[in-house]
Amino acid sequence: MPMGFKNGRSGDLQSAVNAAVAASLPQKRLSTDARGHVQLEKAPGNPDVHIILRGSESGPNYGEAFVAESKERLAKAGFRGSQILIDCSHGNSGKKFEGEVVACGSVAQQVAAGNTAIGGVLIESFLVAGNQKLEPGVTKVEDLKYGCSVTDSCLDFNMT
């Protein structure tokens, strides 16, 4: 099963690469069996890893230079052909659904120009565009707009 690791909110890419390396290697951990006895569990590691560019607190990282750097760092870590996913929301959209359209457009242009390092995109999508505030104990359910996110700003169904 493919596993993806996002860059840090600071924009740090190496933490995602390091996580991919760790996940791809054999692991051992202590666990308990069905009778409650301690046992050593082994996992072979998962070589099917990718990194996800989610942007950062200081701005987007979906541009060609960021993708090229990501590809280079994955190659240096021993991953040949590993692909990069672009999270078009979060730091790459300025946390606004309209920004997702801009990010997706840039990614589409890169892929159309022949960039094979990009494996896909992640988008935030729901029935109604945008988002709304939900304050537990304060917001009344009847005041919420049906189909509108109470977390991240989302594209609506038609935009998706």
Image (tube, rainbow, N blue to C red):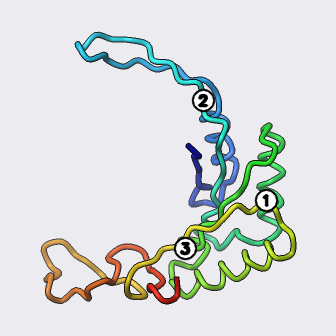
Q: Which residue is mark 2?
A: 45
Q: CA distance from mark 2 to mark 1?
A: 23 Å
Horizontally, residue 144 falls left or right of residue 85, namely left
Q: Position of residue 112 (x, y in %)?
A: 82, 76
Q: Which residue is mark 1?
A: 117
Q: Position of residue 90 (x, y in %)?
A: 53, 71
Label 1 CA crowd tier, 10 Å (few <14, some 14–19, many 20+): some
Q: Quadrant of residue 144?
A: bottom left
Q: Is residue 135 visible?
A: yes
Q: Residue at x 71, y 70 (%)?
A: 62
Mark 2 vs mark 1: which is more N-terminal? 2
Q: Are marks 1 and 3 in contact (CB under 8 Å)?
A: no
Horizontally, residue 129 falls left or right of residue 22, namely left
Please name the amino acid that badge 2 sits on. Gly
Please name the amino acid that badge 3 sits on. Ser
Q: Nearer the viewer, mark 1 or mark 3?
A: 1
Q: Are marks 2 and 3 in contact (CB under 8 Å)?
A: no
Q: Residue at x 64, y 33 (%)?
A: 24
Up-down relation of residue 149 to residue 28 (above or below): below
Q: Quadrant of residue 78?
A: top right
Horizontally, residue 29 falls left or right of residue 44, namely left
Please name the amino acid that badge 1 sits on. Ala
Q: Is residue 55 visible?
A: no
Q: Which mark is residue 89?
A: 3
- Could you tell me which secondary element the residue under label 1 belongs to? loop
Mark 1 vs mark 3: which is more N-terminal? 3
Q: Position of residue 145 (x, y in %)?
A: 26, 88
Label 3 CA crowd tier, 10 Å (few <14, some 14–19, many 20+): many
Q: Which mark is residue 41?
A: none
Q: Which is more toward the observer, 142 or 92? A: 142
- Could you tell me which secondary element the residue under label 3 belongs to? loop
Mark 2 vs mark 3: which is more N-terminal? 2
